[in-house]
Image: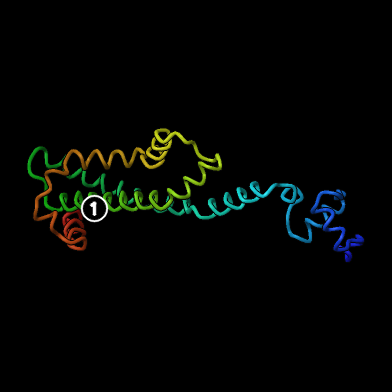
Amino acid sequence: MKERGFPFHQQTIQRIEEGSRSVRLDEAFAMAEILEKRVEEMTWDREAIRRNAARRAIWAGLPTNIVDRVMKEFLTEIEILEAIVETGFDDALGMEAPTGIYCGLELIKRGLERTDAITDQFYKEAESYAQALRELGELPVDEAEEEAAIEEDFQSPAEKRVRDLLEKHGSSIPKSVSRMSLADLARTFAGESDG
């Protein structure tokens, strides 16, 4: 503070901390600059400082933009696959669909299972963040409302169509197909859908 032209001594700081001396506005701005803080941050009580630090840490720790981007890219690929599989079932006209179509359906099934597992894991790990946000008043406490918001976020029309297709035809996947590796499913599907 002395370097900034303010005659501060140890006793001056002690009186300020005790509350027996006020800080002038120009002194407050100089202190904030030295401490790399905003003036309003210096007027908060300890609880407000803790809450602000927690809020910053929480929002910095939630990689929702990454999760959203990966989910959108994945669902775009699944939507393309779903259109091909749906067409294959439509073309079969009530007869047994080609094995490749069932392979595509099995790929969709496994993909959605993996996506659901990733989403569940993300929310499980994020629960501590969510709890902290609730305590800070940043999230609704109503769990039903929160669940509805989560469902709405991850149920796009494309995903709904894909899940409906799986619901409609998933139980008819032959056991021989459901036992295939991902690589074999992809090869068989690509081979039959190309030809």
Q: Position of residue 27 (x, y in %)?
A: 86, 54
- The quarter of the rendered structure image containing the N terminus is bottom right
Residue 172 found in image quarter: top left
Report the side of 186 relative to 138 (left or right): left
Q: Residue furthest bottom?
A: 3
Which residue is identified by label 1? 110
* Residue at the image position 11 percent from the left and 52 percent from the top: 99
> Which colouring convention does the figure follow?
rainbow
* Residue at the image position 23 percent from the left and 53 percent from the top: 110
Q: In front: 147, or 176? A: 147
Report the side of 62 relative to 193 (left or right): right
Q: In front: 19, or 171? A: 19
Q: In front: 162, or 12? A: 12
Residue 85 visible in the shown view: yes
Residue 88 found in image quarter: top left
- The quarter of the rendered structure image containing the C terminus is bottom left
Q: Position of residue 138 (x, y in %)?
A: 54, 41
Q: Position of residue 37 (x, y in %)?
A: 73, 55
SS class, disc 1: helix
The residue type indicated by label 1 comes to Arg
Q: Position of residue 86 (x, y in %)?
A: 21, 42
Report the side of 36 relative to 123 (left or right): right
